[in-house]
Image: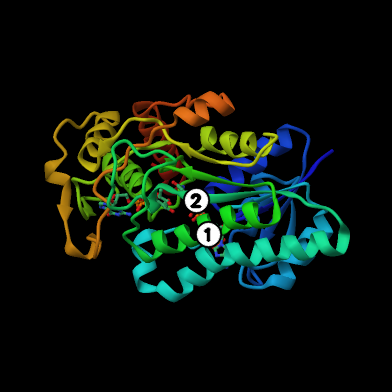
Amino acid sequence: MPNALITGITGQDGLYLAELLLSKGYNVYGLIRGQNNPKTELVEQTVPAVKLLAGDLSDIPSLLRALEVSAADEVYNLGAISYVAYSWDQALLTSEVTGRGVLNILEALRLYEQIHGKAPKFYQASSSEMFGKVQQVPQSEETLLWPRSPYGVAKVFGHYTTINYRESYGMHASSGILFNHESPRRGPEFVTRKVSRAVARIKLGLQEEIVMGNLDAKRDWGFAGDYVEAMWLMLQQPEADDYVIATGETHSIKELLDAAFTVVGIDDWAPYVRQDPQFMRPAEVDLLIGDPAKAREKLGWTPKVAFGELVQMMVESDLNEQKKLHGV
Ligand code: NDP
Ligand code: GDR
């Protein structure tokens, strides 16, 4: 049975990837940070077969120890400070974790190889946020990067460090440039989940309005369960490479609101939505739309869940969750 180590196990993608790898017969280890991580129980309940190892991306010895204990064949680096808006408030921390954390884990992998003579394959969670102020539409692996947030800048550092370690040391290190992907497990700070939860609560009479930021931004939204499959496929290739993972469709936040309110039978959402400058960003990424042709051709990967189905899945899940929570 192959061994896999996942950083970011408590996150949306960590849980989906762990489920996928367990279903394929892997031994799965997850790196968990903090002395009493509040999400430990969630991981233990959702994927009980995952073995949790204490560690942090800013602590190289903890990463080396995790590699040794797991005897990893594949390492998926999903750990990051991942909320773009927050990255302006904590720019240094974001660059430490989301940026330098990648260098730390690549250095731990080199040490591990020197000591144990084994070179695990490596996946880096790169992001469409690296395209930022887009220089080409749609965006592909060749598009010039122009990040627009401390998060985007940190991801660019991690992306090029991954490429550089592949070229310098011959590591099997791949970078997935993933566009936004969502699910009922999405953190409530991100726009899709914020909307699906609020719409469910409005429908149930638990909330009166949603306070939002920029409604004109456009994103290429897919389903997280589909996207973790692409991560795994990248590490099964004979050669490491970089791949854009996207649906090739884009929708505005207004269209997201249309779709979510339609699920609960509300046609006009204007009375329920208020805009507030606190949710506007110092620099915005206005339009993202990915070209996943390379992933389709080389990995045989295609997304299965369309935008409408995704929004419906999220709103219905939040309706059930809110009903249970509030007994309504
Ligand atoms: P989440 O925000 O849901 O999860 C982030 C994970 O990183 C959490 O498990 C978190 O742990 C962990 N983490 C935070 N700080 C550290 C640290 N110092 N050391 C180790 N782990 C840490 O993100 P997603 O699951 O949505 O995304 C996974 C990865 O993919 C991230 O790197 C993200 O930037 C990237 N990405 C995501 C996209 C998306 O649309 N979801 C698109 C493109 C890229 P804790 O719970 O303890 O905070
Ligand atoms: P993003 O996701 O920044 O694309 O990063 P997010 O859902 O936070 O924002 C998407 C767009 O929605 C606009 N927006 C709002 N966003 C939030 N969170 N809250 C609001 O109230 C709101 N109103 C409007 C934003 O301005 C933005 O344009 C996600 C993260 O998962 C990253 O880690 C990942 O790398 C990228 O996707 C790809």
Q: Position of residue 303 (x, y in %)?
A: 47, 27
Q: Is residue 173 left or right of residue 256?
A: right
Q: Position of residue 299 (x, y in %)?
A: 58, 28
- Kindly identify the residue that appears in the image at 28 percent across and 37 percent down: 137
CA separation in Å, label 1 and label 2? 7 Å
- Kindly identify the residue that appears in the image at 62 percent across and 37 percent down: 234
Q: Which amino acid does label 1 sit on?
A: Gly
Considering depth in this image, is 73 or 106 the residue closer to the camera? 106
Q: In this view, does 13 lie to the left or right of 247?
A: right
Mark with earlier residue (1, 2) = 2
Q: Judge whether residue 32 can be spotted in this image.
A: no
Considering depth in this image, is 21 or 313 the residue closer to the camera? 21
The N terminus: image quadrant: top right
Q: In which quarter of the image is residue 182?
A: top left
Q: Is mark 2 on a helix, strand or loop?
A: strand
Give the residue pinned by disc 2. 126
Q: Give the class, few, some or many, for how many residues have Cα within 10 Å of label 2's Cα (few <14, many ≥20).
A: many
How many numbered marks are there?
Answer: 2
Q: What residue type is labelled 2?
A: Ser
Q: What element carries label 1?
A: helix
Give the residue pinned by disc 1. 158
Q: Give the class, few, some or many, for how many residues have Cα within 10 Å of label 1's Cα (few <14, many ≥20).
A: many
Residue at mark 1: C-beta within 8 A of ligand 1:
no
Tell me, yes or no, whether the two marked residues, 1 and 2, touch with CB atoms within 8 Å: yes
Q: Position of residue 9 (x, y in %)?
A: 62, 53
Residue at mark 2: C-beta within 8 A of ligand 1:
yes
Considering depth in this image, is 244 or 202 the residue closer to the camera? 244
Q: In this view, does 120 lie above or below 25?
A: below
The C terminus: image quadrant: top left
- Kindly identify the residue that appears in the image at 22 percent across and 54 percent down: 212
